[in-house]
Every structure is written in C-alpha cells, then in structure tokens.
Amino acid sequence: MTTIEGNLQQVHERLARACRAAARDVSEVTLLAVSKTFDADAVCLALAAGQHAFGENYVQEGTEKIAALRLLRPHAALQWHCIGPLQSNKTRPVAEHFDWVQSVDRLKIAQRLSEQRPANLPPLQVCLQVNVDGGANKSGVAPDALAELAMAVARLPRLQLRGLMCIPEPAPDFGTQRDLFLRAKGLFDQLNAQGLGLDTLSLGMSDDLEAAVAAGSTMVRVGRGVFGSRPARS
Ligand SMILES: *Cc1c(COP(=O)(O)O)cnc(C)c1O
C-alpha cells in the first residue's frame, strides 16, 4: 500500500467515525483532496486509490497540474476545485480549466467567471466563501452581505451556485470550532429557506473535520491528512 493510499483510508475512517457520532450517513460527506504544493505523481497515486476530486489554491500551479493529469491519465474522470483567493485578472484560466470554484466572494469575480466560462463546458460549479468570524481571516463575503451576493450569483448564466465554503480561524477546542462552523450552517439554511436549493456546505480541513461534520459539512477539504505535511511556502 502506498502512503497516500493509507492516508486516504485513515481520512475515510475519521469521516465514518465523525458521521456516526453525528448520526449522519457517510454518503452525505464528500472528500476533496487538497493537492496544492504536491506534484502530478502524488495526484496519480491518490487517483489510483480511488480519489477523484482535487482542490488547488494557486491558479498557475493548478492549471499546470490539470494539464499534466490530462496527459498522464486521459481517461480518468477528475474533478478540479479552485479553493484559493481569486484576483479578477486571473479568472480566465479558472473559468477555462476548473470544474468548481469555492472561493467566490465578490460579484465582479463571479461575473467574469460566467462571461469567461467556455460554451462547450458545463456551467462552472460555485460556492461562495463566507467570512463567519470577521477579523483576521480577510477572504470571504461578510454574513450580512451574503444573501444579496448569492441572489445575484444565482442569476449568472454560466455558473451554478452550489453552496458555501468557510475557513474559520482555528479554535482551541471541538465545541468552539463546531460553533464557528454552525454559523456557516445557519447561513446555508437561511439561503435555502429563500429558495436557493444549495447542496454543498464546504467546511473542515485536516485538523477540524470532525467538528465540521458535527456542524453539517457536506464536503471536507483535506490536504495534509491525505498527502502528508507541506513544505513551508517561501
Ligand atoms: C490548504 C487548504 C486546505 C487543506 O488544508 P489541510 O490543513 O492541509 O488539510 C483546505 N482548504 C483550503 C482553502 C486550503 O487553502
């Protein structure tokens, strides 16, 4: 067994335990493997172990890896999620190469992605990134501006609004972390009460996926838990 295969197995075991504790079915939570800083060979190993959805933070690194995987595994059904902060001058390669974008937090970015999404591809699947704890974490729309943004994004023709993504500050204990995630869950439920039909609540990473599952996450984004520790970025 490769290290990545063993890591994936462990993450799935953690998810199964967390779902059991929360009285949820494991099929309700998808694993996104965050491959940032890891190379195409690492993605191939994860793919061989049954993992098909991958997340990338940096546009150039992501598009290069997507191209590499098309050559290495032309028949594999891979799904690529852009989960990093987006600048408006970098939306085109994202619209052209990714399947999902989870980090939309401004209408201008969403409009550009919709305009730039090629007509021969399915609509780009979108989550809005919400900043539930204000302060230090600068990316994400403020909760009180979320509904207006969501309504506007839902009307864009080449995007399909799927849900919310949130990265709260790390908290010292399970209960505090879960309560931060529950704020995102509350906003998600409010939007659905307004008829938006969202199905994706992207919460939780390597260190806090249990608290995220307890709060209702439907997608955890796990990097180190799958691929091992990352080198520090210089
Ligand atoms: C890096 C990253 C992750 C994965 O983090 P780990 O702690 O390695 O699991 C998840 N989501 C986003 C947005 C990230 O940037």
Image (spheres, grey):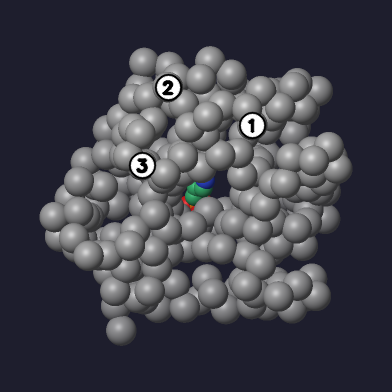
Tell me where residue 48 appears, x and y as whole percent.
29, 74
The correct choice, above or below, for 62 with respect to 75 in the image is above
**Residue under the image location 71 percent in, 75 percent down:** 25
Tell me where residue 116 appears, x and y as whole percent.
37, 24
Tell me where residue 207 appears, x and y as whole percent.
59, 57
Q: Disc 1 vs disc 2: Cβ atoms closer than 8 Å?
A: no
Q: Tag 2, which secondary structure? A: helix
Near-viewer residue (35 or 105): 105
Q: Picture quarter containing residue 210? A: bottom right
Mark 3, residues whose alpha carbon is within 10 Å: few (<14), some, or many (≥20)?
Answer: few
**Residue under the image location 39 percent in, 64 percent down:** 52
Side of 48 relative to 86 (left or right) = left
Mark 2, residues whose alpha carbon is within 10 Å: few (<14), some, or many (≥20)?
Answer: some
In three-dimensional space, the C-alpha distance between marks 2 and 3, rounded to whole angstroms, equals 13 Å
Residue located beneath label 1 in the image: 154
Q: Disc 3 vs disc 1: Cβ atoms closer than 8 Å?
A: no
Q: Quadrant of the N terminus?
A: bottom left
Q: Tag 3, which secondary structure? A: loop
**Which residue lies most toward the left here?**
71
Dot 3 or dot 1: first in sequence order is: 3
Residue located beneath label 3 in the image: 121
Q: Tag 1, which secondary structure? A: helix
Q: At label 3, which amino acid type do we have?
A: Leu
In three-dimensional space, the C-alpha distance between marks 3 and 1, rounded to whole angstroms, equals 18 Å
Mark 1, residues whose alpha carbon is within 10 Å: few (<14), some, or many (≥20)?
Answer: some
Residue located beneath label 2 in the image: 115
